[in-house]
Image (tube, helix red, strand yellow):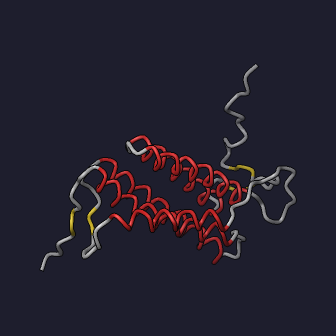
Amino acid sequence: MALKIYTKTGDKGKTSLIGGTKVAKSHLRIDAYGTVDELNSWLGLVADSLQDNETTALIREIQDRLFTVGSSLATDPDKESKMKIPDLHAADITLLEQKIDAMNEVLPEMKFFLLPGGHIAVSHCHVARCVCRRAERLCVGMQEADMFVEPLVLQYLNRLSDYLFVLARYAGHLLQVAEIPWRPRT
């Protein structure tokens, strides 16, 4: 028999962290890993809108790391988990930096702020970048509320948002779509 997707345990607005601690579904920790889940969904759309196999493969790897980030955020740091939770590694951040540098090698120097748009793939990258920044802000908010956040999680989200910005530019480059400069009204 297939596992039922609904448990009815959240019908009163509570959910459990990994470790068993019950919290409100509005809890900052739930908001943070829910936003990481939203980011992961947006990255699926980014991957589906790009025609570059190498980039798509990296995005699938990033999606895997985001499950790791979500697991870390969903775990009660004060309880011993019976589950083996995967870890982020410094090499995950280094990989993003290397990919950013490689894409920047072929991109023109940026001389103005850019408006998101020009192609659906470019726009999807920018939406993912914004969701990533929100996830990062929520994690910083957790720290400010004295909730533990693995330092590599913050570093990874910060670097990932940088990667997504450069990926938006790189996608436009691959698609031969002109960047849209922001021309402030004077």
For the N terminus, give its image quadrant.
Answer: top right
Tell which residue pokes out farthest to the left in this image.
186
Q: Position of residue 33 (x, y in %)?
A: 62, 56
Relative placement, left or right, of 63 versus 103 is right
The answer to whether residue 42 of the structure is visible from this angle is no
The relative height of residue 151 versus residue 179 in the rendered view (above or below) is: below
Front in this rendered view, residue 137 or 65: 65
Q: Where is residue 142 in the image (x, y as percent from the top left)?
A: 64, 70
Relative placement, left or right, of 53 versus 17 is left
Q: In which quarter of the image is residue 89?
A: bottom right
Front in this rendered view, residue 55 or 184: 55
Q: Position of residue 34 (x, y in %)?
A: 58, 53
Relative placement, left or right, of 179 versus 99 is left
The relative height of residue 42 versus residue 94 in the rendered view (above or below) is: above
Q: Which residue is drawn at 38% across and 45% down?
A: 50
How many discs mark residues in the rendered view? 0
Q: Where is residue 25 in the image (x, y as percent from the top left)?
A: 64, 53
The relative height of residue 28 versus residue 14 in the rendered view (above or below) is: below
Q: Which residue is drawn at 68% across and 43% down?
A: 10
Front in this rendered view, residue 5 or 117: 117
Relative placement, left or right, of 37 versus 69 is left
Q: Residue at x 65, y 61 (%)?
A: 29
